[in-house]
Image: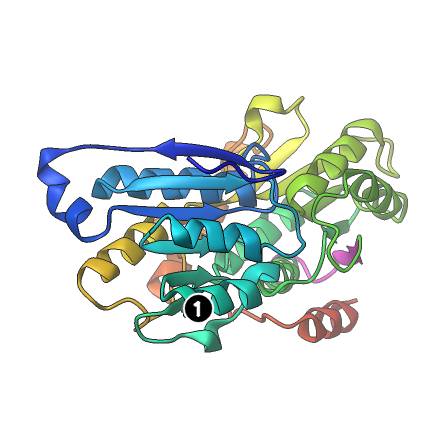
């Protein structure tokens, strides 16, 4: 198998008689991630979700990891030459290159942060939004904040992060209008900047936040480090609410929760749509209703608080509480400014 510079490749093959029909129609797919699939977040959930989808459908999955955020056209071309039935470009910065190479090689591609790019038999978007889970996280944060101030730290302002930031802020205010929401961005694309994540998180803690909602890929490790080593302004513990993945295996008692994403249903649906000759007829998302978005329960959350948050979840699924996804950064800025 081709090896790419600065990339780590693994093959995940499943041979099952019951799924031979799938393998005959689409034998393999490839997913490209900017960082290694060990970040307990975006990159890991993407790689693991694709592998699980491959297992469910009998399709081989190639993962091209740690590709960075630069030009990935050479990697896309090499994967296209290998004949995969779908290339999943797992980063917003890959959209232009992926659609270009997909057209050039006549290979289906999946991209993020560009729903309007939908094209029959060619391009589909999965701008997965965990905003419903982020709203629940906001309700949780407001219930548990001692200082009356919570913080949002992001590694950039892509649509998915913006949707979660705005929903978190709305959840905080819906629970307790007196709570202040501080918002800070590490940089325009500081996804792997752990040092920046630590620095910015410390600044929000100094401004009074005792709960941090962090969105960051690799930079989230810096956020967590800041929470572990910095006291709140009341002298007490600071807690961290993560997104996408589950860091409980490395937690030292500071992880309050995480807005968990399960991307397996999305990738499975893509493969099934290719089989049914429907690829490019719709975009894909995640939701509370099928548990592809959920909130992590940790020992730090009292049972009565958790029960009340789950009651809110039930109301959201029933449509009694509606939370709109706001994907643009301007909406986030306006919302946080208005609320404070």
User: Total of numbered circles in the picture?
Assistant: 1
Taking the magenta stretch, the answer to whether it contains residue 184 is: yes
Question: On the rendered structure, is 132 left or right of 59?
Answer: right
Residue 178 visible to an observer of this rendering: yes
Q: Nearer the viewer, residue 312 or 115?
A: 115
Residue 20 position (above or below residue 148) = above
Residue range highlighted in magenta:
174-185
Q: Going 29% across and 50% down the picture, which residue do you hit?
A: 268
Residue 287 position (above or below residue 22) = below
Image quarter where the C terminus lies is: bottom right
Q: Nearer the viewer, residue 84 or 136?
A: 84
- Residue 277, percent from left and from top: 20, 66
- Residue 100, percent from left and from top: 50, 69
Q: Quadrant of residue 218?
A: top right
User: Disc 1 on helix, strand or loop?
Assistant: helix
Question: On the rendered structure, is 160 left or right of 270?
Answer: right
The residue wearing badge 1 is 104
- Residue 80, percent from left and from top: 41, 54
């Amino acid at each position: 198998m081709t090896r790419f510079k600065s990339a780590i490749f693994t093959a995940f093959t499943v041979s099952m008689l019951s799924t031979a029909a799938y393998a005959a129609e689409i034998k393999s797919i490839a997913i490209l991630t900017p960082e290694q699939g060990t970040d307990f977040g975006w990159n890991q959930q993407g790689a693991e979700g694709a592998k699980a989808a491959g297992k469910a459908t009998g399709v081989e999955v190639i993962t091209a990891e740690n590709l960075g955020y630069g030009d990935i056209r050479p990697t896309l071309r090499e994967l296209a030459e290998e004949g995969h039935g779908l290339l999943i470009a797992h980063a917003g910065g890959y959209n232009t290159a992926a659609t270009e190479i997909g057209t050039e090689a006549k290979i289906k591609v999946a991209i993020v942060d560009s729903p309007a790019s939908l094209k029959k038999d060619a391009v589909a978007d999965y701008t997965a939004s965990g905003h419903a889970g982020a709203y629940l996280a906001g309700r949780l944060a407001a219930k548990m904040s001692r200082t009356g101030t919570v913080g949002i730290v992001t590694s950039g302002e892509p649509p998915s992060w913006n949707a979660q930031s705005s929903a978190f802020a709305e959840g905080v205010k819906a629970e307790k209008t007196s709570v202040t929401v501080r918002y800070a961005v590490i940089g325009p694309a500081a996804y792997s900047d752990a040092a920046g994540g630590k620095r910015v998180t410390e600044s929000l803690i100094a401004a009074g936040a005792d709960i941090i909602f962090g969105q960051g890929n690799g930079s989230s490790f810096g956020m967590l480090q800041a929470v572990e080593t910095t006291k709140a302004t009341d002298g007490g513990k600071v807690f961290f609410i993560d997104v996408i993945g589950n860091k409980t295996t490395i937690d030292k008692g500071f992880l309050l929760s995480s807005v968990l994403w399960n991307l397996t249903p999305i990738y499975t649906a893509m493969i099934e749509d290719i089989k049914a000759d429907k690829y490019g007829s719709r975009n894909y998302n995640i939701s509370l209703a099928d548990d592809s978005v959920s909130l992590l329960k940790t020992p730090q959350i009292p049972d009565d608080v958790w029960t009340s948050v789950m009651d809110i979840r039930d109301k959201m699924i029933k449509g009694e509480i509606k939370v709109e996804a706001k994907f643009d950064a301007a909406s986030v800025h306006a919302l946080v400014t208005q609320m404070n």
